Image: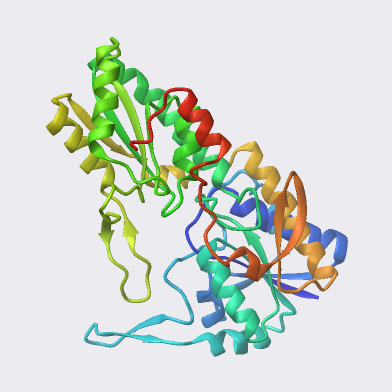
Amino acid sequence: MRIGISTGGGDCPGLNAVIRAVTLSACNKYHFDVVGIEDGFEGLLDISKTRSLNVRDVEGIIGLGGTILGTTNRGNPFKYPVFDKDGKVTIENFSQRVVDNFKKLELDVLILVGGDGTLTIGNELRKMGLAVIGVPKTIDNDLLATDYTVGFNTAVTIATEAMDRLHTTAKSHHRAIVIELMGRYAGWITLEAGIAGAADVILIPEIPFEIDKVCNHVFYRAKEGKHYSLIVIAEGGIPLGRKVRLIEGAKDGTVERLGGIGYWVASEIQRISGIESRNVVLGHLQRGGPPTHFDRMLATRLGEFATELVSENQIGMMAAIQNGKIVAVPLEDAVEKLRLVDPNSEVIRVARSLGISFGN
């Protein structure tokens, strides 16, 4: 067997641990050949961006952040931007080239390590006859059919550590500090980091908030002698009756970039309440650096299981973790829709019981 492995979409801690697990199990247990596909689907549009992987190639990478294969979130072969000499862009469908190059590389299966976007593309390629197996990774944790995705635990850990540091400066200066976190349209990072980091207000996309109610909570804390507040907000947080704030809209085959909501909330708190407020955007710090122990273990288990799926010819499946066990689920089930926070969940109930406001 000849396996291709690709990491697509945004980077996250734990990708190298997946690559390592696939390569080691493929070489040591099954004696398969492994081909690294560089820069996501770019490596299947230009086969010069491929290289063989063996045991020595993955030595010492389990703790490295990022991906040794590179990645991109701009390489959708179904909507690929092509620029002419004048800079004018046209969107082309190069999906058939991906299928043709898969055959030229004499691959038997492609292991795709990705999030919603990458695995949705992989599922469409599967429908064209490409043999695909998925491994879920995204700090957003928004994939169906799996309890956790590679990278999420590290992102939450980093966000929690940042909140620990911001607590002391907020308290010292009697300020309200707003921390904007990643997660796109899902509030998982913000919810879990907010609870673990002892936030006073948690604002997530699944629960539209009212800025007056956020200010009222800050006022209430001040009245109780707590002259500082920590407000954590997801980049996709939405004020009631408004739309998500964007840094840049979708164009040229790329997805829209969310951001700016934290600055707006901090400005409104200061304008309405008069309480000095600051905004911190944690940004790509959540994506970088070494993975946590949890993500290293999860990535290793999922990567090894993906190779096992190859040996059993379970094509079109995704390795997932459910109730602590690694299982195979249909790839199409994982990308049917986004996995979002349930506003009526037990975790939300616990947070409300602790006195945390969700701005509603």
| Residue at x-position 28% and y-position 48% | 240
Locate residue 349 relative to residue 231 in the image: left or right.
right
Locate residue 49 relative to residue 278 in the image: left or right.
right
Asked whether residue 242 appears in the rendered view, the answer is yes
- How many numbered circles does the render carry? 0
65 above or below 171? below
Where is residue 221 drawn, in percent x and y?
Answer: 30, 18
Locate residue 199 relative to residue 192 in the image: left or right.
left
Where is residue 263 drawn, in percent x and y?
Answer: 23, 41
Locate residue 342 relative to residue 323 in the image: left or right.
left
Q: Quadrant of residue 345?
A: top right
Asked whether residue 46 appears in the rendered view, the answer is no
Where is residue 216 drawn, in percent x and y?
Answer: 25, 27
Q: Nearer the viewer, residue 242 or 186?
A: 242
Coloring applied to the structure: rainbow
Image quarter of the N terminus: bottom right
320 above or below 324? below
| Residue at x-position 34% and y-position 38% | 360
293 above or below 130? above
Q: Quadrant of residue 134?
A: bottom right
| Residue at x-position 25% and y-position 87% | 85
Q: Residue furthest top?
A: 225
Where is residue 179 drawn, in percent x and y?
Answer: 33, 36
| Residue at x-position 48% and y-position 82% | 78
164 above or below 332? above
